[in-house]
Image (cartoon, rainbow, N blue to C red):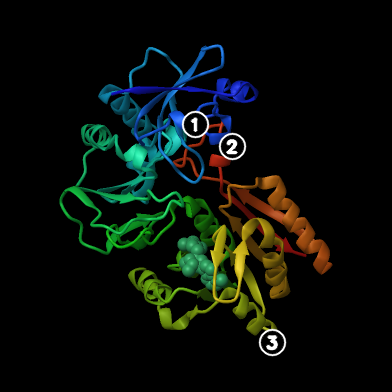
Amino acid sequence: METIQLKIKSKFVSKYKSGYPLIQKEALLNVQALKEEGTLLSLSDEKNQFIGKGYYGRQNKGLGWILTRNEKERIDQEFFNKKMWEAVKKRDSFYQSTETNAFRIFNGEGDGIGGLVIEYFNGYYLIQWYSKGIYQFRDYILAALKTTVDYKGIYQKKRFDTQGKYLDDDDFVTGERGEFPLIVKENGVSFAVYLNESAMVGVFLDQREVRKAIRDTYAKGLKVLNTFSYTGAFSVFAALGGAEKTTSVDLANRSLSKTIEQFSINHIDYEAQDIIVEDVFNYFKYAGRKNLKFDMVILDPPSFARSKKFVFSAEKDYKNLLKEAIAITEKGGIIVASTNASSFGMEKFKGFIEDAFKETGGGYKILEQHSLPEDFRTIKEFPEGDYLKVAFIRKL
Ligand code: SAH
């Protein structure tokens, strides 16, 4: 395969030399050299000093990823086998668990190959391809996965669009077809998962530790409001932790049947819980009018969303979301504030919390905070990959 030579602008050289893996358009002197996604790239500085080898694949984040900084290393079957084996080995304790059988085994650049994510769901693997470029390495990557692990079946999702959007397709790749819902376990709790339905499978694995903390440490006896609830995963953990009642609110029609299903497979009477299909911002108004108060309010919005009436951007609007939550949280109650926006870090997020409480005139205390769990491996050279920020805040 042809390798394209790319030159890094001098002001970006030290960043790339110290390990930054994402190939950004603004760092390149000769972007026009890029033709077909999936081509191998060799990056050097203006004096032709070697920096790294990578591939061309367009994502909203950038134009590709560096794969090695060793000029002699070839990007061949052996390369992919080694990366896969190292990644799987690092998840050994997850494979050994009897309580959990859903986890991420390959986390993009955190495991050395940006644009590639693989998750394990009770015998099945789901590969997510984040660009046409990485998909060109499909045969290598599939072969590497097959030689490294035992599996019942393998599914895939193509998220090629530059927005990371999902292309609708039959997602089955090889092995046995699964029967859906596939029931997986997380810390002893069941989740119904659909690998062949849409971009999202029914559960976001990155919140595993947050769900556990809600169940094990906080939920007992509380009235819990779960906003942006999707399939109600936080509500299920709260109910199993002894919450007095949960209220789940999500705009999407599918969230009603999906949440009923998650409660039911965990033997929780869903009729004793509230599941509301509505815009969260309308619900806050309604709760305000009715003077409803909750002991725990969970906030887990998408980083960007457009509904009929509102456009929500975490970076611009999180502070106001917190103010809405503060207004309907009991004194002494808890707000679980979460964001997956990679455009800002924990310090800025804490700034939103500080400002929201200041503007509503109350005190607060951060009880605990979370970032990505261990199976979502990240590297310090790419801090934006460590996107998850969660704070448990007590309203004083
Ligand atoms: N907290 C969920 C994941 C949230 S995914 C979990 O733990 O599994 C984001 C969800 O927000 C989606 O289900 C989407 O339908 C919902 N959503 C987006 N904008 C919304 C709005 N304005 N009001 C209510 N729900 C919204």
First in residue order: circle 3 vs circle 1 = 1
Distance from the alpha carbon under mark 2 to that under mark 1: 25 Å
Left of 175 or right of it: where is 299?
A: right
User: Farthest front residue?
Assistant: 32
The residue singled out by tag 3 in the image is 289
Give the class, few, some or many, for how many residues have Cα within 10 Å of label 2's Cα (few <14, many ≥20).
few
The residue singled out by tag 1 in the image is 31
Q: Secondary structure at mark 3?
A: helix
Residue in the image at 27% along x and 22% along y: 78
Q: Secondary structure at mark 1?
A: helix
Q: Amino acid at mark 3?
A: Arg
| Residue 234 visible, this angle | no
Q: Amino acid at mark 1?
A: Val
The residue singled out by tag 2 in the image is 383
Q: Quadrant of the C terminus?
A: bottom right
Distance from the alpha carbon under mark 2 to that under mark 3: 42 Å
